Image (cartoon, grey):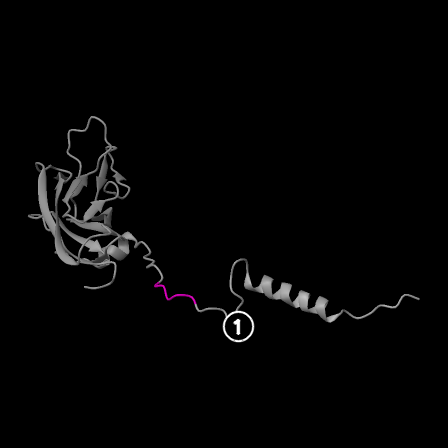
Amino acid sequence: MVKIEPFSKPIVGAVLLIEAFLAAGCGADAPTVISTEMPSPAAVDPPRVVLPKSDVQLAAEFSVPEPSPSTPVVAAMKLDPPTAIAGESAELAVYVRIARAHYIHASGDSDSAFSPIEMRATLPKGLQTQGEWRFPVAEIDKAGRRVFRNALILRCPVKVSSDAPASTLVVSGQLSFQVCTDELCWPLQSIEVSTPVTIQSSGGSP
């Protein structure tokens, strides 16, 4: 019969020494106290998630006068959200209302003698456009022309520079269009629009 002796004290001491070395890690001093608590993560503000609004939602935020036969097209501009954060994105929106029985021409008609609606904006330092102005789908009238009636929203994404200082700026623009009825068309016209923009630094200070 083979008699198995218990580990001798030198062997037990060696095993404990190896376990302590592995627990300490390569090149590290062995900890004097082992804590089972996980370190608390550093407090980090989650990024803002801004869902895009529909045209109907944006239109409800505007205060635009009623168009009339003498002023058949009215328009206004706003930034959404109105307070922009440095380094984040926003959207310029222009709400256009058209008088009843009137319409304006859209782009896309080949060899058209009419001028389509067009939007230009001048952005101050600290704001940059992130693409072209986006128009809704136009209506096709009886003559096969693309037109807009009643109301429409024009949208353009913009980005605030990451180093933009806290400030209040003004974005200005010009809306050009040709408005018609079934009987006549006016010459090309334009409307000046503008909106204030409040920029906050990325640190959140106003």
Residue 44 in view of the camera: yes
In percent of the image, x 31 and y 54: which residue is there? 52
Q: Residue at the front extreme? A: 10
Question: Which residue is the site of mark 1?
Answer: 32
Left or right side of 51 for 61? left
- Residue 66 lies in what quarter of the image? bottom left
Q: Is residue 20 left or right of residue 132?
A: right
Magenta stretch prevailing secondary structure: loop
Judge whether 21 appears above or below 79 on screen.
Answer: below
Residue 130 in the image, given as x and y percentages of width and height: 26, 43
Q: Residues within 10 Å of mark 1 (few under 14, many from 20)?
A: few
Which residue is most to the top?
111
- The image quadrant that residue 5 belongs to is bottom right
Q: Is 28 on the left or on the right of 16, as rendered?
A: left
Q: Is residue 44 magenta?
A: yes
Q: Height in image: 148 above or below 56? A: above
In the rendered structure, which segment of residues is drawn in magenta? 41-45
The residue lying furthest to the left in this view is: 70
In this view of the protein, can residue 82 be seen by the observer? no
Badge 1 amino acid:
Thr
Total of numbered circles in the picture?
A: 1
Residue nearer the viewer, 41 or 54: 41
Front residue of 89/206: it is 206
Residue in the image at 55% along x and 60% along y? 25
